[in-house]
Image (cartoon, rainbow, N blue to C red):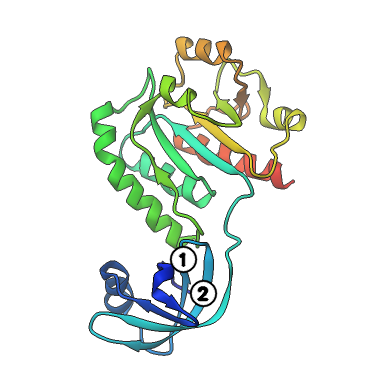
Amino acid sequence: MPHFFVKKENITDNKVIINDKENYRHIARALRARVGENLLLIDENQMQYETVITEITNNEIICEAKNIYRSKRDLEFDLYLAQSPLRSDSQLTVMEKATELGIRGVYPCITDNCAVKKEVAQSKVEKWQKIMYEASKQCERAKIPTCFSVTNLTEVLNKEFDRIIVFGERSTEQSLKQYLGKNPIKKGEKILVIIGPEGGFSQREFEVFRQKNLPVISLGDLILKADTAVTVALGDIIYEYQG
């Protein structure tokens, strides 16, 4: 069932009006939806609406909500990612997969071995945000994650989180299972995951992590590409929490 974001102000009782240009064009023009077809809608309060199209005019689509309930497409804790931007399609994959895995937001973080210049990365933020928006629609996310402005390690390490977890392919101290076995994630906790570039973190950056007493976690003996490491790290965190 196609999934779209709507505003609460456009919902009255069981009637939903879709009149923003983007959704209207997508539903009426691209999908060529017809009266009687089903749409899955969600508002900013994470309320889900299973609807049936009752009318399509030249500028709006009117639906009737048949079932209304709070969305369950969300994690029980707030998961954020600080990640060194990658070139071209690899970064698009990161934004898409992170969204599918329930991330709240991504901090594009310039590191010593980053392959992308800061000004180039900043010019891509709007595109990355759009990728996250489209991925949210496809996987029925209740909240659209945020792609923040480009930052660096010093700035991101000074932000307020309940805990920060660093993943590195070398100079690692323990596995994720070992770490979370001793320090299980709590419901509602705000967690930042940091993952470096293809070339890995520099010795200077590892020293910063040590000075701040941050856990440096291993993803195993295999050397993973950075975009693969993002998917594995986030997926493993979710698995360990649910397990």
Which residue is painted at 24% across and 80% down in the image? 59
Q: Residues within 10 Å of mark 2 (few under 14, many from 20)?
A: many
Which residue is painted at 36% across and 24% down in the image? 114
Contact check, label 2 and label 1, Cβ < 8 Å: yes
Can the viewer see residue 59 in this picture?
Answer: yes
Asked if residue 5 is positioned above or below residue 214 in the image, the reply reads below
Q: Which residue is mark 2?
A: 49
Which residue is painted at 53% across and 67% down in the image? 47
Using residue 19 as the reference point, say whether residue 52 is left or right of it.
Answer: right
Q: CA distance from mark 2 to mark 1?
A: 8 Å
Q: Nearer the viewer, residue 21 or 39?
A: 21
x and y percentages locating residue 141 in the rendered image: 50, 58
Where is residue 164, by image quadrant?
top right
Q: Which residue is mark 1?
A: 43
Using residue 180 as the reference point, say whether residue 7 is left or right of it.
Answer: left
Amino acid type, label 2:
Tyr
